[in-house]
């Protein structure tokens, strides 16, 4: 059987949101308030669903351009797009939800079977669709836009789903993909220009980010296991071995991660050997830290004033 060739191109890869990375870093080093802990859980659940969606979408084989994680602004209003797929005759706008359990629609309200109302994802999709149409018009692109609300979690059920709606339930995913793959698509320079225009408008720093206040002196210092988030105590033969999950990591990788986490939390401060030595609670000798930083970062300044970017 002849293997089908994929023609889709991911123009913008999905990356873990900075807010999520910061909260995960802070979780190990300080006690999060409940609202921040809840925000962390929500972000982790959402990102997990988007990664699941990406894995499912690898089954899409027709010619297309895929843009993930777009944050755009039109007429002073910001909006986010989980995934946008550009094909020959239309744009597919995907809003991805990783909810689980039984839900139902009560008019325009979205509720759990227990009666708890949550933010209606159909409203979120409609808002993104409306704002994206405005933006496309401003850019001079006229191409049909097809919105989709994907519930990616197999443990999700929506009771009494409307017959005509953009909703794609877990048990409909395969049929939806089969339908998309039966569509003929041939891209032109016009489609590439559209992707480039949208990418040029992507906002890297989210105005919606919510992280708690913190300062260097109050955060717990040390080396954190990348696999389980526990603190690593000591190393041997250039490797740290986690007592909690038994994962291993080379000392060079540990130093690089520590430096990047410091840069993320304190972008206004310089990364120096002495600062990083304090940040990891003196778990690695300064000469080793200096060697790794020299090999993996750009050195600025001279002698005792040397720092790394």
Image (cartoon, rainbow, N blue to C red):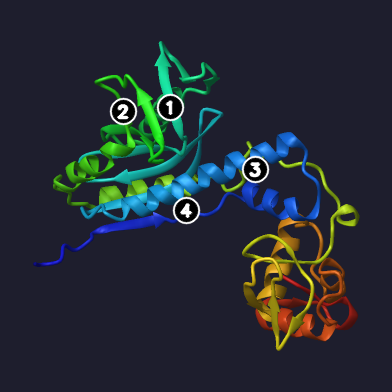
Up-down relation of residue 124 to residue 80 (above or below)? above
Residue 71 x/y as whole percent: 51, 41
Q: How many numbered callouts?
A: 4
**Mark closer to the chain start, 1 or 2:** 1
State how far apart marks 3 and 2 are (Cα).
Answer: 28 Å
State how far apart marks 1 and 2 are (Cα).
Answer: 18 Å
* Label 1 crowd bin: few (<14), some (14–19), many (20+), radius 10 Å: some
Nearer the camera: disc 3 or disc 1: 1
Residue at 73 percent of width and 50 percent of height: 27
* Label 3 crowd bin: few (<14), some (14–19), many (20+), radius 10 Å: many
Residue at 89 percent of width and 53 percent of height: 218
**Mark closer to the chain start, 4 or 3:** 4
State how far apart marks 2 and 4 are (Cα).
Answer: 23 Å
Residue 141 x/y as whole percent: 31, 37
286 lies left or right of 133? right
**Mark closer to the chain start, 4 or 1:** 4
- Residue where numbered disc 2 is placed: 166
Dot 2: element: loop
* Residue 112 vs residue 78, the one in the foreground: 112
Residue at 29 percent of width and 33 percent of height: 145
Dot 4: element: loop
The quarter of the picture where residue 210 lies is: top right
- Residue where numbered disc 3 is placed: 40
Nearer the camera: disc 1 or disc 2: 1
Up-down relation of residue 113 to residue 8 (above or below)? above
* Label 2 crowd bin: few (<14), some (14–19), many (20+), radius 10 Å: some
- Residue where numbered disc 1 is placed: 102
- Residue where numbered disc 4 is placed: 14
245 lies left or right of 125? right
Q: Quadrant of the N terminus?
A: bottom left
State how far apart marks 3 and 1 are (Cα).
Answer: 23 Å
Residue at 22 percent of width and 52 percent of height: 188
């Amino acid at each position: 059987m002849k293997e089908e060739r994929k023609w889709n191109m991911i123009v913008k890869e999905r990356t873990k949101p900075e807010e999520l990375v910061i909260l995960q870093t802070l979780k190990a080093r300080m006690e999060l308030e409940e609202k921040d802990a809840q925000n962390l859980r929500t972000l982790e659940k959402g990102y997990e669903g988007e990664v699941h969606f990406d894995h499912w979408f690898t089954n899409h084989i027709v010619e297309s351009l895929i843009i993930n994680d777009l944050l755009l602004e039109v007429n002073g209003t910001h909006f986010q797009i989980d995934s946008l797929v550009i094909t020959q005759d239309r744009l597919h706008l995907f809003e991805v939800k990783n909810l689980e359990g039984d839900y139902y629609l009560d008019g325009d309200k979205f509720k759990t079977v227990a009666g708890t109302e949550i933010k209606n994802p159909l409203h979120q999709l409609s808002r993104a669709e409306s704002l994206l149409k405005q933006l496309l018009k401003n850019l001079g692109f006229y191409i049909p836009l097809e919105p989709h609300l994907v519930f990616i979690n197999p443990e999700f059920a929506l009771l009494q789903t409307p017959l005509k709606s953009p909703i794609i339930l877990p048990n409909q995913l395969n049929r939806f993909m089969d339908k998309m793959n039966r569509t003929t698509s041939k891209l032109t320079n016009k489609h590439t220009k559209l992707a480039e225009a949208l990418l040029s408008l992507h906002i890297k720093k989210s105005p919606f980010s919510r992280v708690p206040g913190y300062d260097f002196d109050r955060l717990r210092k040390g080396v954190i296991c990348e696999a389980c988030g526990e603190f690593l105590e000591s190393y041997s033969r250039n490797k740290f071995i986690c007592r909690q999950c038994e994962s291993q990591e080379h000392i060079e990788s540990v130093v690089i991660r520590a430096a990047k986490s410091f840069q993320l939390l304190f972008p206004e401060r310089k990364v120096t050997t002495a600062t990083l030595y304090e940040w990891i609670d003196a778990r690695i000798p300064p000469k080793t830290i200096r060697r790794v930083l020299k090999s993996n970062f750009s050195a600025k300044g001279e002698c005792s004033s040397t720092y790394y970017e």
